[in-house]
Amino acid sequence: MTTRLTGAPVQRTEDRRLLTGAGRFVDDVQVGPQTLHAAVLRSPHAHARIVDIDVDAVLDLEGVHLVWTHEDLAGVSAPLAEPLPLLIPHPALTHGRTQHALARDEVNHVGEAVAFVVADDRYVAEDAVARIRVTWEVLEPVVGLEQARAGERLVHDDVPGNVGARLEQGTADAEQMAAALEAAPHRLALDLEVERSACTPLEGRGTVARWDPDSDRLQVWTSTQTSTGVRAAVAARLGLDLGQVDVITPDVGGGFGVKINHPWPEELLVPAAARVLGRVVKFTEDRREHFVSSAHERGQLQHVEVGFDDEGRLLALDVEFWHDHGAYTPYGLIVPIITSTQLLGPYKPQLYRVVFESLYTNTTMVTPYRGAGRPQGCYAMERTMDAIAAHLGRDRTEVRAANFIQPDEFPYDQGLVFQDGRELEYDSGDYPALLEKAKALVGWDEFETFRAEMAAEGRRVGIGLACYVEGTGVGPYEGAHVHVETSGKVKVATGLTTQGQGHQTVFAQLVADELGCRFEDVEVVTGDTRRMPYAVGTFASRAAVMSGSAIHLAAKRTKEKALRIAADALEADEADLEIVEGSVRVKGSPGSAIDLGTVAVLSNPLRYAFDEASKAATQFSVGDPGRPPVAEDDEPGLEGKDFYSPERATFASGIHAVVVETDPDTAEVTILKYAVVHDCGTLVNPMIVEGQIHGGVAQGVAGALFERMAYDESGQLLNASFMDFLMPYVTEVPDGIDIDHQETPSPLNPLGIKGAGEAGVIPSAAVFAAAIEDAEGIRVTRMPMSPSDLFHLRTDQRQE
Ligand code: MCN
């Protein structure tokens, strides 16, 4: 009997290495005795023209090997001087803008790369950067959405009103919507704001590159979520063949979206410098650089108009929002499109219309951060649900239940079009069952008794709940290669990268289950283009669905081949064989068996034959008659490769509920209970999924109560360090998070999996706003909520 590992809480095999300091991150990579180090001159201004750059004082500095400004780039390679690509264009993005690897004649945010220096060590490189003299013509910056919307100052001269894009969609046009709102028995309007924040992985970005003149190849080690993307960008920008570039992703100390490649300037400049100098070159981002030069997200102003009936059913939902895109749009409209199309969550309004404007500001650019536009959308939708319940005097869960898509309505078409032009269709789900579980888990029905008990002690408590649906596991494809070594060890390669999600463990579980090998015999390689050059990457909670399915299919092929070879060797029928614990055996006759390693040896039939007596492979020379290949069409080698490309995304879902206490004096918010019910289809490893939820909730607590980007009016980021950007400690994150799972398998992939990596962060702003509002009896419209925000809100609303 074997125990199936899918669904089992298998301990993460990668943790011993990572927790004992044996991890190897990009800054640990040592590939040559004399590595050179890069530093970047970054703009001190939010908006300025570059009048002149004088690098003379640097050129003769001892230990400096190279100084580049934009002017030098075309001489290295013409495409290197072009603006970086706009990765995901969209017809509505009429004014897409991307940065140059080094600013050409204007900078648009503090931290934008202006000059690049390579020197013997980082000290010399930094000293050199400090000696570069730039003559600036400082321009007035556009900071914040209000200034962007006013359009009096422009970020890009040729973008009128700072509007990069305006997109409207839904099941009603403006006229139909106005009529439906007018006709609705009840009507409300809400203004809801989420401030800008960032994901701040503990390891910043970093790249090491080596040019090998003998093989005419570049090797690049980089901290990325998309190694194949870096490879394609480096090859294209340096004028190399794709086959001349290897990208290797070592351990990655967190990505959370910011390490998706667009590409980042340093990911091009470091390899370019390595090639020009014929030396190993390294760049490691420091913390301040990460804050000002990498990417942010979340900043959105949202206006909701809603019409509903006496039960709280949504008759007309009209949403308008303004998205702060920062200085550039490398990913096109991906974040606001996700907000606009996934805002509805589990609900089915009779009519929905959404319109957004994507606006430029002179701040760090915006790219997807875990959750990617969904936290803002969920905040808009769930605050609306709470407002409807308050208006009607009904229970907040009743109003939600009245609007749910029902389990028998799947697949459910929301009538919306996603980024790729495909219609958004939910594959499966059971939202009423989720709600019942969430209520039970948090103690919803018993809360009023608890509130009364706490009030008797002079304590204020509140409860909040928020639902979400999340499109996960998007295409276009992912691949896998499974190879059984002659030792019986199984090597698995998938091209996507890993940043702590436990892929080594989960993918080994899937291979062990499908192939029948031992779990501990499986070694998984991720993010190395030498092993798997065709891949997309780790984002959009897609690894389990995409690589998981590809690995399952590749393991299945390998198993089929193993059975063909073993059937011949054992003179048995394939249908009578099974693979258990790495041994192929005749069912019911365990003595008649050969191990997978021997099958791997036999898969090279010109050199090996099977010895019946010893059940081993015997070697013979090429000239010997030997056995013919067992299956005429089989190639040598016990391996299988496959790719998985789904029709569309799968839709995971969940509900979070929180009980908070607010301090009447200090306005501090304490979490008393946090409950999560989550449905990501078939659970491969519940312990890992729970770990992902814990991490997501911690990041969500951070975004709801602590973290924000504090810009002054000149566009300086005032809190660009962990001294001032309040990342919560373990003491601020709930001690225990109660988690319950529901498994509604996806019909779209062979394992029924949906994604799980982002879910924990999506409903946080909504759920905390609801709970604080409930505790305090005040209206919460803007998140995050620090104690001082709450203190002022109390004072302001009491004066009203
Ligand atoms: N899983 C599972 N069963 C399921 C679904 C998932 O066992 N039904 C497992 C997966 O096999 C994987 C983990 O849960 O080990 C997360 O799976 P998935 O939802 O496919 O997400 P990805 O692996 O694609 O990871 C990306 C996702 C995203 S988009 C962000 S952002 C994020 C996140 O993962 N960044 C992270 N979690 C992170 N966790 C860490 N430690 N570091 C990051 O940078």
Image (cartoon, helix red, strand yellow):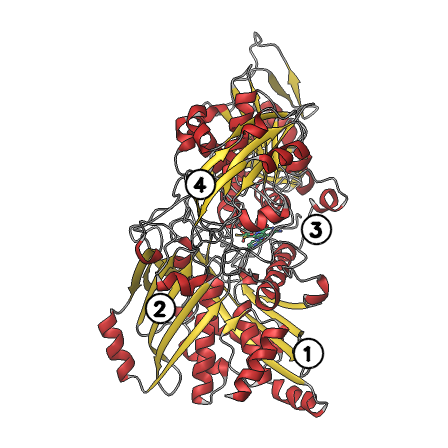
Q: Cα distance, mark 3 to mark 1?
A: 41 Å
Q: Secondary structure at mark 3?
A: loop
Image coordinates of residue 606 in percent, x first then y, are 55, 15
Residue 208 as seen in the image, left or right of residue 341: right
Q: Secondary structure at mark 4?
A: strand
- Residue reaching furthest to the top: 623
Q: Earlier in the sequence, mark 1 or mark 2?
A: 2
- Using the rendered image of the protein, determine whether residue 412 is visible from the camera's viewpoint: no
Q: Earlier in the sequence, mark 3 or mark 1?
A: 3
Residue 219 as seen in the image, left or right of residue 452: left
Which mark's residue is nearer the viewer, 3 or 2? 2
Q: Secondary structure at mark 2?
A: strand
Q: Name the amino acid type tagged 2.
A: Glu
Residue identified by numbered label 3: 11
Q: Secondary structure at mark 1?
A: loop
Say few, some or many: other residues with alpha carbon within 10 Å of mark 4 (under 14 / 14 to 19 / 20 or more): some
Residue 340 as seen in the image, left or right of residue 511: left
Q: Cα distance, mark 4 to mark 2?
A: 37 Å
Residue 320, numbered circle: 2
Residue 666, numbered circle: 1
Residue identified by numbered label 4: 50
Q: Name the amino acid type tagged 3.
A: Gln
Which mark's residue is nearer the viewer, 1 or 2? 1
Q: Name the amino acid type tagged 1.
A: Thr
